């Protein structure tokens, strides 16, 4: 068993678990988004690691190179990074709006309200 | 241009119209452009369907031949879904005009742009034959849906949108992990190509893990019990027009992705080897019972219908867990029929919100006198949801029960019947309030809504009865689709 050869994948799993844990266990909405980013990044590393060919050169067309790394995962991840940035932007924008509307971004402090009855709930407070 | 060359435009037209829409001022212009592009998309989808039933249409983007380029692969299953999405969007937009004017009074250009993006994302997921392309369109439609939900009038809409964003992104990333593992094992992302290569490596743990990640990821998107927690809040707090649209289309598209990946890419044998049937059967049954019972004591009509949607997803999960042509056909036909009835129900509730500003069930008291046509529509769509004969809902439940009896699966039959009885109870609460209780004396007089809302609502009601009597479009197309998925048809 080649332990060191799978180094990248251990990092992937570790980052993935840290990210997922942060999303689930953190109450702070900004921290949840950080966890989400970690989680996504770990998947990016997984794709990129899979594209590496040992001994291969950069995937640029030139004479004399027979072996080169697979460029496709990089392209896919470029797209996935853009998606991740957009998700983070929307998530943070929502967090800002929630802060404005509720005065807090701690999940536990916000009432599990659902419109109509919540208004009465607030009125009774 | 041939119909094959027009086919990609059913996705591209709304996508191109979206940024233009965002820049248009006022209220009429953005709406008109959205209407125009959605109508064109619906016409193209309607023309594509008969062609696709005869045999798959394949379109290679930029003439990069698959498996290297991205292709659109359209057969009976996704042409059926694409027609459903674009037709529902076309019916909803005229209804939305009035409702959106009230609920989103300002900056309607960006609102309709988001609507178009969500719609073209859903169309793209449906038509594409490339698993990574599915991820990209999934995120296009999801991100615009989060923003649409956040347009809700109450501040709870922000919270619901945030929670949906977290769950939805987790789901999409799980899906990404799944296709990453598939790519590592097979070296391709094209669905048809994957279908050929997956059997060779089906013993590999990586491919089995890919199956698990994909099913859980898509399970989050389709709100399969117990991954449904985001759905009631999102449906209840979104603007009414958005609720109608996502309730009718978004979860259905996720079901399609699941079917396509499980049956076309992994194949029937692989799915049977994995605990696919057991998981979906159990979760489907628990989902139907749990969500139907939860629906009964919800305080607001939108929340109640949202829980009912979770229960309907349970029926679909139950149908596709049977892994037979009849079962899959029942699932596909329920996707179509549920869009019709839930669309109509949410439109009726949206009309009440428009006039009353509330959808609390106790505010429905005596409403049948002041809004007779809206409430009649609610009752008729409710009958379809319950599954009374001559309605579309009956057809899909009948198909499901038949498929279950063919396999001697009596548990499924009993659960479907119990679920229908529970639907009588929760729909009955609103009907009782509207027809049997007196209107509160201190309420300001309520008028019936105008034609802009009434016509789309009644179009859907008529469709509910039409497809309850004439099943040639729905049941036959769904059966063809199921044969394609099971790999027994041409």
Image: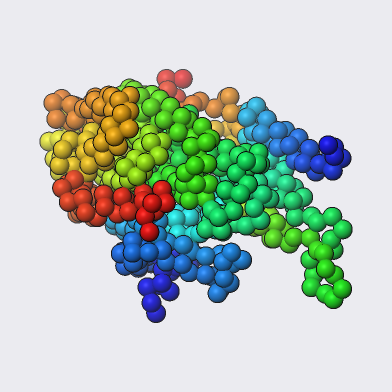
Task: Specify whether B201 is left or right of B46.
Answer: right
Give the x, y percent position of residue B340: 27, 47
* Figure check: A103 above or below B125: above
Can I make out residue B394 in this image? yes
* Residue nearest the observer in this picture, B344 or B443: B344
* Left or right, A112 with reference to B454: right
Q: Position of residue A58 (x, y in %)?
A: 82, 64
Picture residue at 73% right of the left edge, 62% below the top? A71
Q: Residue at x 32, y 32 (%)?
A: B407
Relative vertical location of residue B144 with respect to residue B67 in this rendering, above or below: above
Percent position of residue B206, x then y: 66, 41
Residue B39 placement: quadrant? bottom left
State the image coordinates of residue B453 (x, y, percent, origin top left): 24, 51
In the rendered image, the quadrant that contains the C terminus of chain B is bottom left
Image label count: 0
> Residue drawn at (79%, 60%), measured in percent from left and top?
A69
Identify whether B282 is placed above or below B258.
above
Q: Tell me the quarter of the image containing the N terminus of chain B.
A: bottom left
Residue ranking furthest to the bottom: B1
The residue depicted at 79 percent of the width and 73 percent of the height is A61
Q: Identify which residue, B254 or B160, lies in the foreground.
A: B254
* Looking at the image, residue B303 lies above or below residue A89: above
Please say whether residue B93 is visible from this viewpoint. Answer: no
Quadrant position of residue B69: bottom right
Instruction: Say left or right for A9 vs A80.
Output: right
Q: Nearer the viewer, residue A63 or B132?
A: A63
């Amino acid at each position: 068993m080649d332990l060191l050869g799978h180094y990248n994948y251990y990092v992937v799993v570790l980052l993935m678990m840290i990210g997922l844990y942060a999303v689930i266990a953190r109450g702070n909405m900004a921290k949840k988004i950080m966890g989400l980013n970690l989680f996504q990044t770990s998947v990016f590393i997984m794709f990129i690691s899979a594209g590496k060919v040992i001994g291969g050169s950069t995937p640029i067309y030139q004479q004399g190179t027979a072996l080169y790394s697979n460029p496709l995962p990089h392209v896919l991840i470029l797209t996935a990074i853009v998606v991740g940035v957009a998700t983070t932007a929307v998530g943070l924008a929502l967090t800002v709006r929630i802060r404005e509307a509720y005065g807090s971004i701690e999940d536990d402090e916000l009432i599990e309200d659902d419109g109509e009855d919540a208004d009465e709930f607030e009125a009774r407070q | 241009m041939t119909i094959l060359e027009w086919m990609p435009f059913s996705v591209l037209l709304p996508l191109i119209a979206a940024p233009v829409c965002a820049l248009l001022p006022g209220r009429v212009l953005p709406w008109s452009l959205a209407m125009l592009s959605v109508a064109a998309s619906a016409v193209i989808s309607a023309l594509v369907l008969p062609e696709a039933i005869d045999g798959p249409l394949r379109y290679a983007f930029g003439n990069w031949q698959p498996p290297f380029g991205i292709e659109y692969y359209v057969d009976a299953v996704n042409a059926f879904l694409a027609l459903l999405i674009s037709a529902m969007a076309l019916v909803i937009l005229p209804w939305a005009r009035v409702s959106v004017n009230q609920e989103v009074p300002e900056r309607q250009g960006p609102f309709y742009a988001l609507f178009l993006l969500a719609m073209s994302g859903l169309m793209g997921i449906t038509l594409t034959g490339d698993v990574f392309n599915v991820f990209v369109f999934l995120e296009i439609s999801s991100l615009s849906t989060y923003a649409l939900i956040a347009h809700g009038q109450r501040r709870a809409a922000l919270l619901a949108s945030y929670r949906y964003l977290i769950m939805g992104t987790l789901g999409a990333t799980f899906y990404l992990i799944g296709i990453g593992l598939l790519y590592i094992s097979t070296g391709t992302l094209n669905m048809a190509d994957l279908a050929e290569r997956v059997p060779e490596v089906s013993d590999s743990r990586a491919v089995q893990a890919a199956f698990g990640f994909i099913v859980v990821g898509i399970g989050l998107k389709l709100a399969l019990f117990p991954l449904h927690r985001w759905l009631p809040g999102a449906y209840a707090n979104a603007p009414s027009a958005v609720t109608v649209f996502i309730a009718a289309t978004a979860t259905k598209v996720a079901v399609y992705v699941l079917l396509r990946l499980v049956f076309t890419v992994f194949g029937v044998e692989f799915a049977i080897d994995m605990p696919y049937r057991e998981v979906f059967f159990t979760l489907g049954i628990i989902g139907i019972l749990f969500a139907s019972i939860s629906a009964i004591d919800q305080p607001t009509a939108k929340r109640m219908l949202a829980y009912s949607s979770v229960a309907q997803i349970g029926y679909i999960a139950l149908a596709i867990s049977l892994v037979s042509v009849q079962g899959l056909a029942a699932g596909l036909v329920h996707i179509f029929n549920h869009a019709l009835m839930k669309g109509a129900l949410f439109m009726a509730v949206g009309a009440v919100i428009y006039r009353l500003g509330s959808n609390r069930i106790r505010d429905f008291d005596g409403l049948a006198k002041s809004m007779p046509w809206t409430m009649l529509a609610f009752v008729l769509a409710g009958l379809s949801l319950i599954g009374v004969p001559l309605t579309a809902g009956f057809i899909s439940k009948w198909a499901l029960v038949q498929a279950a009896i063919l396999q001697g699966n009596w548990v499924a039959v009993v659960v479907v019947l119990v679920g229908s009885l529970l639907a009588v109870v929760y729909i009955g609460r609103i009907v009782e309030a509207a027809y049997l209780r007196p209107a509160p004396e201190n309420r300001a007089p309520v008028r019936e809504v105008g034609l802009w809302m009434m016509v789309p609502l009644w179009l859907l009601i008529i469709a509910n009865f039409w497809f309850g009597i004439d099943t040639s479009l729905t049941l036959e197309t769904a059966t063809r689709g199921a044969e394609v998925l099971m790999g027994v048809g041409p």
